[in-house]
């Protein structure tokens, strides 16, 4: 089992940047592929980005491609989401999740463990 804690959410202006972190504890972090999802009010949870155990395979949602970067540091048991050129529509609660299989990285049902989420608000 693994416990996940997100941090780094904040209020930011359009065009700004944020870096989210997700710290893992418990079972060995490096056995898990990791994903970031987000959920805006009244909307379903949607895929943002995913990274394989070693970091060699990465996937992004089209809506964030070129603006967001996912990375991980297995020595620090942490996965990051660097978000640049933020838009109003990026406003959401952002969740990290851990998956043992990396079989379908964009599907939330694939993931075994979830953090509690961190709020990102993009507003002028």
Image (cartoon, grey):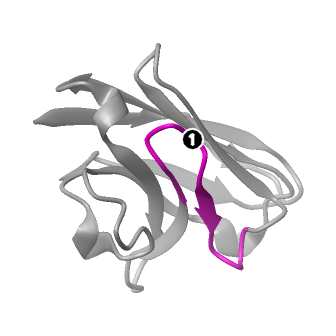
Q: Residue furthest top?
A: 75
Magenta span dominant secondary structure: loop
18 or 25, which is in the foreground? 25
Q: Image quarter for residue 88? A: bottom right
Relative to 49, is 52 on the left or the right?
Answer: left
Q: Image quarter for residue 82? A: top right
Q: Residue 90: x percent and y percent?
A: 66, 67
Q: Residue 83: x percent and y percent?
A: 73, 49
Relative to 93, is 24 on the left or the right?
Answer: left
Q: What crowding class fits label 1: few (fewer than 14 Cα within 10 Å), some (14-19), or many (20 or more)?
A: some
Q: Which residue matches tag 1?
A: 55
96 or 15, which is in the foreground? 96
Question: What range is drawn magenta here?
Answer: 50-64
Residue drawn at x 36%, y 49% is: 117
Total labels drawn: 1
The N terminus lies in quadrant = top left
Q: Residue 86: x percent and y percent?
A: 79, 59
Q: Secondary structure at mark 1?
A: loop
User: Is residue 62 located in the magenta-colored stretch of the structure?
Assistant: yes
The C terminus lies in quadrant = bottom right
* Rendered view: 70 above or below 89: above
Is residue 68 visible in the rendered structure shown here? Answer: yes
Residue drawn at x 89%, y 56% is: 15
Residue drawn at x 20%, y 33% is: 3
Is residue 40 visible in the rendered structure shown here? Answer: no
Q: Image quarter for residue 101? A: bottom left
């Amino acid at each position: 089992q693994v416990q996940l804690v997100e941090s780094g959410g904040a209020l930011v202006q359009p065009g700004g940047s944020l870096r989210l972190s997700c710290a893992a504890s418990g079972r060995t972090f490096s056995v898990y592929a990791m994903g970031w999802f987000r959920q805006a009010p009244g909307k379903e949870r949607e895929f943002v980005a995913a990274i394989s155990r070693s970091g060699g395979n990465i996937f992004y949602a089209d809506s964030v491609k070129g603006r967001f970067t996912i990375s991980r540091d297995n020595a620090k048991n942490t996965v990051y989401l660097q978000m640049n050129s933020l838009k109003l529509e990026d406003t959401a609660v952002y969740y990290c999740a851990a998956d043992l299989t990396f079989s379908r990285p964009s599907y939330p049902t694939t993931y075994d463990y979830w953090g509690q989420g961190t709020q990102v608000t993009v507003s002028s």
